[in-house]
Amino acid sequence: MARRVLAALLPAGRLWLGEGLPQRLRGVWPEGVELSEHVGGGDALVDLAVVEVGACGPRGRCDAHAGVRASRVWGMSGSVAPFGEKALDGERLERLFTPRAMLAFEEDRWRVLEVASGISARDVQEGAPFPLVAGPDLGPLRIP
């Protein structure tokens, strides 16, 4: 999953990685590209913040706070089913990466965009207490 996240992150512009994420991504970071060149912080607005997520609610909010101002926030979760029914007060995620799938929060629902090999959208749905959607464009995780 780290390779898929990295492929999506590199063209992101000014990037901030939450606690623990630089270490998780270091093993797949491209050779010759300094990690510090892609990590922002402080009071400046960043294009994309990535946070470690333990739980996500039905309205796109998670249990994590970025600690920076960001135009967009993505989440990474080590859990195959980080979904819960209760509303959370953390960041509102645009994307969520789990070991099983990549999802996007669109309008008022989670959409399954890509799934890991051997996993179906139905498998991802089984771990969520609220409806997820998947369209005809659902495909396998694009891992470089």
Image (cartoon, grey):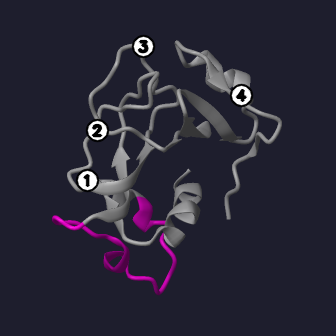
Q: Going from the N terminus, do you reach mark 2 or mark 4 first? A: 2
Q: Main secondary structure of the magenta part?
A: loop
Is 33 magenta? The answer is: yes
Q: Residue furthest front?
A: 107
For marks 2 and 4, give the CA distance.
25 Å
Question: Secondary structure under badge 4?
Answer: helix
Answer whether labels 3 and 1 touch (C-beta < 8 Å).
no
Q: Going from the N terminus, do you reach mark 4 or mark 1 first? A: 1
x, y (%) of residue 11? 53, 71
Left or right: 141, with 17 as reference point: right
Using the image, tell me which numbered label, if any, was put on residue 85: 3
State the residue in front, 20 or 94: 94
Q: Say which of marks 3 and 4 sits in front.
A: 3
The segment highlighted magenta reads: 25-44
Answer whether labels 2 and 1 touch (C-beta < 8 Å).
no
> What amino acid type should be assigned to the residue bearing mark 3?
Glu
For marks 4 and 1, give the CA distance.
30 Å
Give the residue at x 29% y 54%. 18
- Residue picked out by circle 2: 64
For marks 3 and 4, give the CA distance.
19 Å
> What amino acid type should be assigned to the residue bearing mark 2?
Ala
**Considering the image in quadrants, where does the C terminus appear?**
bottom right
Please tell me how crowded label 1 is: few (under 14), some (14-19), or many (20+) other residues with Cα within 10 Å: few
Instruction: State how many labels appear.
Output: 4
99 shown above or below 11:
above
Q: Going from the N terminus, do you reach mark 2 or mark 1 first? A: 1
9 shown above or below 103:
below
Give the residue at x 25% y 53%. 19
- Residue picked out by circle 4: 121
